[in-house]
Amino acid sequence: QVQLVESGGGLVQAGGSLRLSCVVSGSIFSRNAMGWFRQAPGKQRELVARITSAGSTNYADSVKGRFTISRDNAKNTVYLQMNSLRPEDTAVYYCNALIYSTAVATWGQGTQVTVSS
């Protein structure tokens, strides 16, 4: 049974930074790509960053150059460093294991990020 536990969200002013963490239980972590998603009120959940098991990354255009995804395989943890935050980054952020760009595990509770202008 895979469990995903996100943390690190909070309230920050525009231009600020946050670092999100996601601890993944189960063997799925080492062999799967991992992704960070976000869901703003009234909007669909979107994939914003992806990292393969080998460490290759890609990003949604909206966060490229500001967000950095990384993983620590020894700790079964994936991170999202978010810099130069904007009010439009406000959302609940979730991590998940991926097959291509499709989430495959049950969603965790997410972590709320709120960026004030």
Image (cartoon, rainbow, N blue to C red):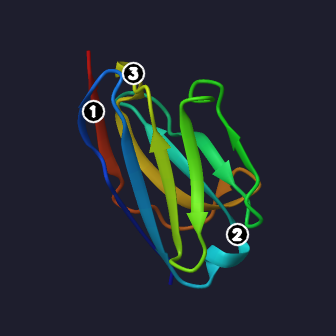
Q: Mark 1 points at which residue?
A: 114
Q: What residue type is labelled 3?
A: Arg
Q: Name the residue under label 2.
A: 32
Image point 58% across, 24% down: which residue?
62
Q: With 25 as the anchor, is 50 left or right in this view? A: right
Packing grade of label 3 (10 A; few <14, some 14-19, many >=20) is some
Alpha-carbon distance for marks 2 and 1? 29 Å
Q: What residue type is labelled 1?
A: Thr
| Front-lying residue, 65 or 6 | 65
Image point 77% across, 65% down: which residue?
54
On the image, the x and y values in percent for residue 82 come to: 45, 38
Quarter of the rendering occupied by the C terminus: top left
Q: Helix, strand, or loop for circle 3? A: loop
On the image, the x and y values in percent for residue 28 come to: 63, 78
Q: Name the residue under label 3.
A: 86
Q: Splitting the image into 4 quarters, where does residue 97 fall?
A: bottom right
Of mark 2 and mark 3, the one earlier in the sequence is 2
Alpha-carbon distance for marks 3 and 1? 9 Å
Looking at the image, is 47 positioned above or below residue 15? Answer: below
On the image, the x and y values in percent for residue 59 come to: 66, 37
